[in-house]
Image: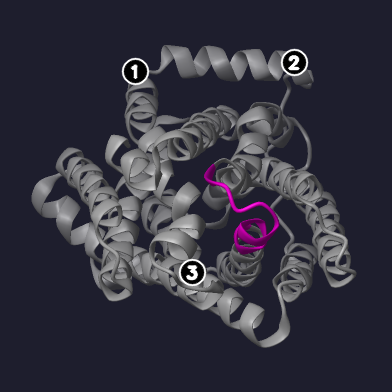
Amino acid sequence: MTEAKAWSPFRHGAFAVLWTATVVSNVGTWMNDVGAGWLMTSLAPSALMVSLVQVATTLPIFLFALPAGALADIVDRRKILLVMTVAMMLTATAMGLIVLADAMTPPLLLIFTFALGSGAAFIAPVWQAVVPKLVPREELQPAVALNSVGINISRAIGPALGGAVIVALGVAWPFLLNALSFAAVIIAVLWWRQASPAPSHLPAERFWNAIRVGLRHARASGPFKATLVRAVAFFPFASAYWALLPLITRQELGGGPDLYGLLLGSAGAGAVGGAFLLPVLKAKLGVDRVVTIGAFGMAAVLVVFAVVREPITAAVASGLAGMSWIAVVSSLNVSAQIALPEWVRARGLSVFITVFFGGMAFGSAVWGQVASLFGIPAALLAA
């Protein structure tokens, strides 16, 4: 992929505007995640409770991605984006106000985190299904890659900013700023006018039948099933890094919210760098080897965090985690996109998202329990 082609989706105004709005919103989301993870280390500093924050973030996407994908294929996607984004803005505002009032409890924090994750579950397949509508087919792969870059730019900025905000203003402000960041998406979606779909002479699909059709197509597609198998082999184990990082920062490294934000920011920066290297690596090595290298890289990161107690080394390892993560996630995402036809794309992607976040939720709960019983280093080495 040439450099010009890599950036070509930005020539399309709708893609550029929605991409920018999503990056702004994702910065807020990462600030929110830093606030939630760090707040739980204060409210209930056990490995299991801290890992449950990650579970509460990812479990809703596992539970609701399938119906969300069916909904995205039979209901106006723009309306779904607006309704869910407004609901998430109100949820984040309530979180911030409750923390300001010093009334937050561990169960309440998990409930609010689950609610935000539920909103993300209904939005995720919509965003992924919208991308092919914003750019020509020949620019789909660079558009998906740029989405990954945007996610990881926000991952580089948001956590570091969230940690700094906690230190400067207090732990309530990442939630309040996250609420404000949703305004960017609302404005962009109100501005966007999607092209009218081609008229269909088929009867409108019903909700539950749409889910069944999507599952049948996923079972019948060999390339798509191969993508899911690789997702199951990676995400439950890689989840240990994300689930235990707040407690690793506080207990193993002796750091504060600024170090936690720095480690997450290093992972985001590594992912951004990895995203720019991916086209070259895929051209030289092929997608299969890139995914394999990413898996080995993530395993190396878990070993380093199990034995190292030095913040600088941990930050370097986090950069490797980001590079390894983007190598696997971006490759599998493109594979899923290419394997799915337009008429069932949102539902098919919702199956991929279900496997992705189901593996993350399951793995987070398992490694949190293992860490509670045997210690954080043992959990990381086992993962």
Q: What residue is pinned by disc 3? A: 260
Q: Considering the numbered disc 2 on the image, is that residue within a helix, a strand or a loop?
A: helix
| Identity of the residue drawn at 34% across and 18% down | 222
In the rendered structure, which segment of residues is drawn in magenta? 37-47
Q: What residue is pinned by disc 2? A: 208
Question: Of label 1 and label 3, which has the lower sequence position?
Answer: 1
Q: Considering the numbered disc 3 on the image, is that residue within a helix, a strand or a loop?
A: helix
Answer whether residue 153 is visible to the viewer in this image. Answer: no
| Identity of the residue drawn at 78% across and 44% down | 107
Whether pointer 3 and pointer 2 mark residues with C-beta atoms closer than 8 Å, the reply is no
Answer whether residue 332 is visible to the viewer in this image. Answer: yes
Q: Position of residue 51 (x, y in %)?
A: 55, 44
Question: Of label 3 and label 2, which has the lower sequence position?
Answer: 2
Crowding near pointer 1: few (<14 within 10 Å), some, many (20+)? few
Question: Of label 1 and label 2, which has the lower sequence position?
Answer: 2
Q: Which mark is residue 222?
A: 1
Q: Which mark is residue 1?
A: none
- Is 220 or 22 nearer to us in this picture? 22
The answer to whether residue 81 is above or below residue 322 is above
| Quarter of image, res 252 | bottom left
Q: Position of residue 348 (x, y in %)?
A: 53, 28
Q: Nearer the viewer, mark 1 or mark 3?
A: 3
Q: Position of residue 90 (x, y in %)?
A: 87, 60
The answer to whether residue 144 is above or below residue 368 is below
Q: Position of residue 267 (x, y in %)?
A: 38, 64
Amino acid type, label 1: Gly
Left or right: residue 291 compared with residue 271: left
